[in-house]
């Protein structure tokens, strides 16, 4: 996770060398943990190796900072309680990566290599693949050499099949590839060379020029804010149910008091409870949040935190 002190350095424009190294190392950890593709880097260089270099991690980090600043992603960080700051910084990074992956998909559509990979996989799972005269053939039923037809006869049928559109909003290609294979075999009544099937399936797709705008910015008008608030009502009711007035006051103090930084021991003394008891209550409350709520994005999370803070304040009075 990201260090809170270094996050404050970054958003204040005073990032230290140690902080810079921390962000590079942490982003490198996420890159390797989730196996993010190098295609998410905007670069003129064409490096075909799958392994990330240190320079590529640095470039990704710089582009993440630039994107976050240009989109105002850091503007709301001062509204986030310290205990959640690192978590929400990770959400900003995830949003950036998701946006880049979407852009890359929109630029490329379904590549021939990806289509080949999916066709081979689906054929192994759902169809019969036989090797005849050193060539692989595919069909939906058992077959032998006598069942083969000249490809010219098959090709004449395939050219009349309807195209399957791939839109810029398409996220998953496997269902479309599976549908295309079914269309092929519904039109021909004979086995087909695996390589010819791959070509036929790929040519069935209508791939128009893709666009890559960043069109998924979170709405911020009052109407959408009201919808978001209502969305959280039942979730928050489940989370705060069973809390006493004193418990709500202590939890709110620990998680949402940004006026004065205090240790857990100091807060426990203030409320005259053992430190272990306070720690248990805070930990149980956080786990209850995790069980009941997962944010859609960082804005969704911010609105949720604001609402749960208000709910605790209301219980405290």
Image: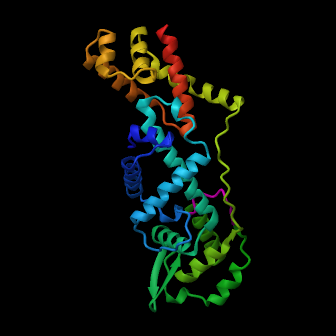
Front residue (pair 310, 266): 266
The residue at 71%/29% (across/down) is 223
Front residue (pair 242, 84): 84
Q: Magenta includes 82?
A: no
Place of residue 196 in the rendered image (x, y in percent of width and height, measured from the top left): 58, 83
Q: Quadrant of residue 185?
A: bottom right
Magenta: main secondary structure: loop
Q: Is residue 109 visible?
A: no
Q: Number of callouts in the render? A: 0
Q: Which residues are magenta?
A: 165-173
Front residue (pair 232, 218): 218
Place of residue 101 in the rendered image (x, y in percent of width and height, measured from the top left): 55, 58
In the image, taking residue 242 as reference, residue 276 lies left or right, namely left
In the image, taking residue 248 as reference, residue 102 lies left or right, namely right
Place of residue 47 in the rendered image (x, y in percent of width and height, measured from the top left): 48, 73
Compared to 177, does 74 lie above or below?
above
Q: Magenta includes 172?
A: yes
Place of residue 131 in the rendered image (x, y in percent of width and height, measured from the top left): 44, 85
Compared to 47, does 106 lie above or below?
above
Front residue (pair 12, 79): 12
Q: Is residue 275 visible?
A: yes
Q: Quadrant of the N terminus?
A: top left
**What scheme was used to colour the molecule?**
rainbow
Q: Quadrant of residue 24?
A: bottom left
């Amino acid at each position: 996770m990201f260090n809170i002190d270094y996050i404050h350095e970054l958003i204040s424009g005073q990032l230290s060398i140690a902080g810079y190294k921390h962000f590079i190392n942490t982003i490198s950890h996420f890159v390797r943990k989730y196996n993010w593709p190098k295609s998410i880097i905007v670069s003129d260089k064409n490096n075909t190796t799958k392994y990330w270099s240190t320079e590529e991690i640095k470039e990704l980090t710089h582009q993440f900072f630039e994107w976050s600043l240009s989109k105002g992603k850091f503007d709301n960080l001062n509204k986030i309680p310290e205990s959640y700051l690192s978590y929400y910084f990770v959400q900003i990074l995830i949003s950036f990566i998701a946006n880049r992956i979407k852009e890359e998909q929109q630029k490329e559509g379904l590549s021939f290599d990806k289509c080949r990979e999916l066709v081979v996989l689906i054929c192994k799972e759902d169809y019969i693949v036989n090797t005849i005269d050193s060539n692989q053939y595919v069909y939906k039923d058992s077959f032998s050499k006598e069942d083969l037809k000249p490809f010219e006869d098959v090709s004449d049928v395939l050219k009349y099949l309807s195209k399957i559109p791939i839109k810029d909003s398409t996220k998953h290609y496997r269902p479309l590839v599976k549908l295309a294979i079914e269309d092929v075999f519904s039109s021909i009544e004979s086995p087909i060379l695996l390589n010819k099937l791959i070509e036929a399936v790929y040519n069935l797709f209508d791939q128009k020029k893709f666009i890559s705008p960043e069109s998924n910015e979170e709405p911020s008008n009052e109407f959408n804010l009201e919808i978001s608030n209502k969305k959280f009502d039942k979730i928050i009711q489940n989370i705060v149910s069973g809390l006493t007035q004193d418990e709500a006051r202590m939890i709110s103090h620990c998680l949402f008091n940004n006026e004065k930084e205090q240790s857990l021991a100091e807060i426990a003394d203030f409320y005259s409870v053992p430190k272990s008891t306070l720690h248990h209550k805070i930990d149980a409350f956080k786990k209850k949040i995790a069980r009941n709520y997962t944010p859609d994005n960082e804005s969704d999370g911010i609105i949720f935190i604001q609402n749960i803070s208000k709910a605790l304040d209301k219980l405290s009075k």
